[in-house]
Image (cartoon, rainbow, N blue to C red):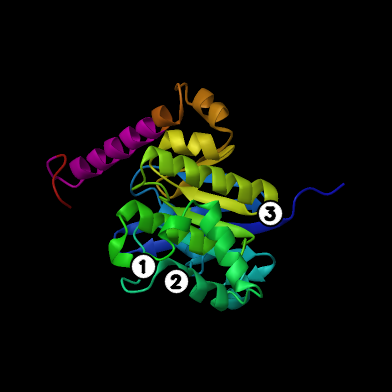
C-alpha cells in the first residue's frame, strides 16, 4: 500500500551569492499532510531554500518539483497548489479584511467565494474584523489575515516563514489549531521556518536543520535533540549557532582580521 503523495521534492539545491555559497546541496521532500519545520541559525540558508522551493529564486544547481511540476518551467501550474505566508508581507491599507480575502478567493478561482471567505474568517477567528481596513489592524492581526488568505484554497502545500513571530500567545494558539485542522482535515502539507523552537515542537512532528547551507539533521524533534545531546530544539539551535560563530571567527583570523570585525 502506497504512502501519502509526495508534494514537494527538492534535490541537490545549490545557490551561490557574491559572499559565498548560501545553499550547498540541500535535499528536501514533503508529503501530503506532513508538517515540517525548516530550522537553523541566521545564515544557514533557510530563506534561500524556501524561495527556491517557491520558484522565486532560481537555483544554480539542483531541481524542484511540486506535485510533479518542475520549476521554473511549470511554476504557474505548481503555484496553484501552494500558499505562502510571511509576517513581513504587506496588506493593502484601504481594503477591508473581507474584501481582501474575497479578492484572493476570486484569484484562486474558487467557485463559492463568499462561503470560502466566511469559512476562513471563522477558522482563524477573524469574523469580528471582517469590516476592518488594513490601517485598523495590529501587526499580529495583519499576520493572521495573511495566513487566512494563504490558506483560503486549502492548498496542497502551505509555506510559512516566521508565521507567529508577531502574535500574542492566544492568537498563536488559534493559528496553530487552524493549521493542524488544515493538515489533518484537508491533507495540506506545512513547511514552516521559525526561530520559536517551542512553537515548532508543538506544530511539527518532523524538523530539518540547516547549517552552512547543508542539511545536518532530519527527523523528529526528540530524536534530533538526543543526537546532539541537548535537552530540546533550542539547545540544538544554540549549538549550531555557536558552531557558526566559531567558524566565522576562524575565517576572520585566517584572513588576518581581528575576530568579530567586519569582512
Are the residues flagged by discs 1 and 3 in contact, CB closer than 8 Å? no
For residue 12, say whether it is visible: no
- The residue where tag 2 is placed is 100
* Horizontal and vertical percent position of residue 190: 57, 51
**Residue 183 — which label?**
none
Q: Residue at x 39, y 34 (%)?
A: 237
257 relative to 115 in the view: left or right: left
Disc on the earlier residue, 1 or 2: 1
Mark 2 falls on what kind of element?
helix
Are the residues flagged by discs 2 and 3 in contact, CB closer than 8 Å? no
Mark 1 falls on what kind of element?
loop
The answer to whether residue 255 is magenta is: yes
Toward the viewer: 201 or 237?
A: 201
**Residue 91 — which label?**
1
Q: Mark 2, residues whose alpha carbon is within 10 Å: few (<14), some, or many (≥20)?
A: many
The answer to whether residue 251 is magenta is: yes
Gap in Å between the C-alphas at discs 1 and 3?
26 Å
Q: Mark 1, residues whose alpha carbon is within 10 Å: few (<14), some, or many (≥20)?
A: some
Within the image, what quadrant is residue 145 found in?
bottom left
Toward the viewer: 43 or 261?
A: 43
* Horizontal and vertical percent position of residue 17: 34, 63
Q: Which residue is drawn at 65% across and 72% down?
A: 112
Looking at the rendering, the stretch of residues picked out in magenta corresponds to 237-258
Q: Which residue is drawn at 55% across and 40% down?
A: 204
Mark 3 falls on what kind of element?
helix
Q: Which of marks 1 and 2 is in front?
A: 2
- The residue where tag 3 is placed is 186
Q: Which residue is drawn at 33% across and 46% down?
A: 42
Amino acid at each position: 500500500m502506497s504512502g501519502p503523495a509526495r508534494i514537494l521534492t527538492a534535490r541537490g539545491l545549490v545557490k551561490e551569492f557574491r559572499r559565498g555559497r548560501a545553499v550547498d546541496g540541500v535535499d528536501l521532500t514533503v508529503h501530503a499532510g506532513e508538517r515540517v519545520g525548516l530550522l537553523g541559525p541566521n545564515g544557514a540558508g533557510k530563506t534561500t531554500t524556501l524561495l527556491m522551493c517557491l520558484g522565486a529564486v532560481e537555483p544554480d544547481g539542483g531541481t524542484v518539483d511540486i506535485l510533479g511540476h518542475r520549476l521554473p518551467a511549470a511554476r504557474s501550474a505548481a503555484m496553484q497548489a501552494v500558499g505562502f505566508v510571511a509576517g513581513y508581507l504587506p496588506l493593502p491599507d484601504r481594503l477591508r479584511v473581507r474584501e481582501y480575502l474575497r479578492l484572493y478567493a476570486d484569484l484562486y478561482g474558487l467557485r463559492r467565494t463568499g462561503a470560502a471567505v466566511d469559512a476562513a474568517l471563522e477558522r482563524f477567528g477573524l469574523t469580528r474584523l471582517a469590516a476592518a481596513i488594513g490601517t485598523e489592524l495590529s501587526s499580529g492581526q495583519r499576520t493572521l489575515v495573511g495566513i487566512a488568505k494563504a490558506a483560503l484554497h486549502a492548498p496542497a502545500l502551505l509555506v510559512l516563514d516566521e508565521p507567529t513571530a508577531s502574535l500574542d500567545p492566544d492568537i498563536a494558539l488559534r493559528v496553530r489549531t487552524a493549521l493542524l485542522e488544515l493538515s489533518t482535515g484537508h491533507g495540506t502539507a506545512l513547511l514552516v521556518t521559525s526561530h520559536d523552537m517551542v512553537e515548532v515542537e508543538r506544530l511539527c512532528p518532523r524538523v530539518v536543520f540547516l547549517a552552512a547551507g547543508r542539511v545536518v539533521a532530519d527527523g523528529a524533534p526528540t530524536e534530533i535533540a538526543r543526537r546532539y545531546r541537548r535537552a530540546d530544539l533550542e539547545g540544538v539551535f544554540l549549538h549550531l549557532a555557536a558552531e557558526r560563530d566559531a567558524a566565522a571567527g576562524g575565517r576572520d583570523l585566517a584572513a588576518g582580521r581581528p575576530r568579530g570585525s567586519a569582512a
